Image: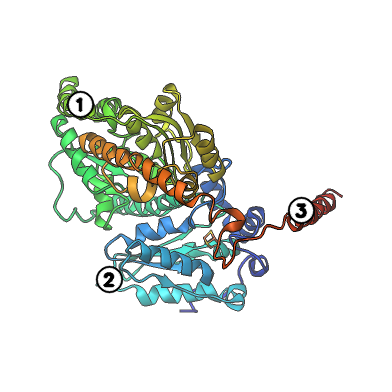
Amino acid sequence: MSAIIPITPLPNAAAASADGLGCHAGKDQMLDAAAKAGKSEVLAQYAADYPKGPHDQPQSMCPAFGSLRVGLRMRRTATILSGSACCVYGLTFTSHFYGARRTVGYVPFNSETLVTGKLFEDIRDAVHEQADPDKLDCIVIINLCVPTASGVPLQLLPKEINGVRIIGIDVPGFGVPTHAEAKDVLAGAMLQYARQEAMAGPVAAPRQGRNSKPTITLLGEMFPADPMIIAQMIAPMGLAVGTVAPTREWRELYAALDCKAVAAIHPFYTASVREFQAAGRPIVGSAPVGIEGTHDWLGSIGAACGVSQADIDTARNQTLGAMRGVLAAQKINARITLSGYEGSELLVARLLIECGADLRYVGSACPATPWNKHDADWLQSKGVHVQFRASLEQDMAAVHEFKPQLAIGTTPVVQAAKELCIPSLYFTNLISARPLMGVAGAGSLIQVVNAAIGNQARFDEMKAFFGSVGQGDEAGVWEDVPVMHPDFKKEVRRQFEKKQKKRKAEEMG
Ligand code: SF4
């Protein structure tokens, strides 16, 4: 095999082997190293696809988890990581925590194999070894931060071995801001590959055969019942739900491209949208959440598919009547703040407002795109502060500012809210993991939110019982009553401030 591609030193091996490259290294240092290593083009594409804001560094899990998860959820697909052992440990741990039930491949490296280019050789050998067409349709290789910054050239891997497709992607934390957008990196790369295959000749039909009706591809990972609920909603317009992308199988990619229109339910799939547009498919943003959201979305889908106004009205009447009934019977009466990194935050925010909530703030770690503009405009017209690329600090500031009766957010936000004696719900585990669309979405959200708000009395009781025990300096296990040392604290602070001043003076001069 070494005769095919001889071992060549990496373009920027010296930079890659420099001490300190990783999450903890400066973003600029990593970007510079990657650019020198010949990755400028891919990084420029990421910069265009995933525009940065105040939140331009991962503040949650490693972004590569998004790509890893998309690969692990697909049948007949093997995923191999190339990166530092600590990164791979964290990523495999997280994927198994979320029930991957699949082996994650890993090609380890050391400074020698990185510097000499042997790492690429090892990756190529691993791919050849794995490429068994009886077991696999596709092998995904993901370059993490250090191999990306070192320029490990995955693009030089064969596109296909024994009929098994090979997809190599760079997913560095300094180029892809969130794990949500990392899902798009892999989904987009797969759609591009599948589109080129479809253009080159006949491709496999979906397992259950082609749908006789024109189909809508749903873009975004959603609760399993949501596609079925959407299918019922659009049936009066003569439309069917085709495939949900990212898909669960390679051949579904062709079905996803073979649609009448794409519903960008999750708005951050920029690279995937580019592939659908290249295939000539119109894209519709937002989603059928709440009465106004569903009304508008059904209208947009109908218009994109050339459906008559009469059929659009029939679809609207069928769903909106039932939804009005649910919303008339129960309400949310509470002040709420909402934040998350899944990309569906604005949809949940819309639904909360339509369910009666006094929502003050919605923060999303994802960026503003054409596909969430409608939702952002709608929310802002209701007086909600919409923060794209929200940082943890902004989410926390909103909790302090608005003193909500319920804080929905990421783990650190929920933890802080609980310390403040505010009932709170994890966005990812408790809100994302339930239906959101149509009548079922409204009913389910009202139920979980009202149950959480109803816990306020339990928080008050616990707070009254424990007081300030276990907070600040008193946290931890004590055998005696903690003794405060204010003088010591003062001295440590004085020394710290002195050091800070000295560092600043050195930086300036
Ligand atoms: S791959 Fe992920 S965990 Fe590793 S250095 Fe990059 S962002 Fe951090």
Which residue type does callout 2 highlight?
Pro
> How far from the left and from the top, in percent, is residue 26?
65, 56
Q: Is residue 390 visible?
A: no
Quadrant the N terminus occupies: bottom left
Look at the numbered discs 2 and 1 and tell me whether their residues touch, using CB distance below 8 Å. no
Q: How many C-alpha atoms fall within 10 Å of the one at disc 1: few (<14), some, or many (≥20)?
A: some
Local SS, label 3: helix
Height in image: 120 above or below 36? below
> How far from the left and from the top, in percent, is residue 82?
49, 68
Query: Of the residues under marks 2 and 3, which one precedes in the sequence?
Result: 2
Q: Which residue is mark 3?
A: 490
Q: Relative to the observer, which residue lies in front, 206 or 21? A: 21
Q: Residue at (27%, 71%) from the top-left corner? A: 133
Count the numbered circles shown: 3
> How far from the left and from the top, in percent, is residue 377?
43, 25
Residue 133 — which label?
Answer: 2
Which circle, 2 or 1, is nearer the viewer? Answer: 1
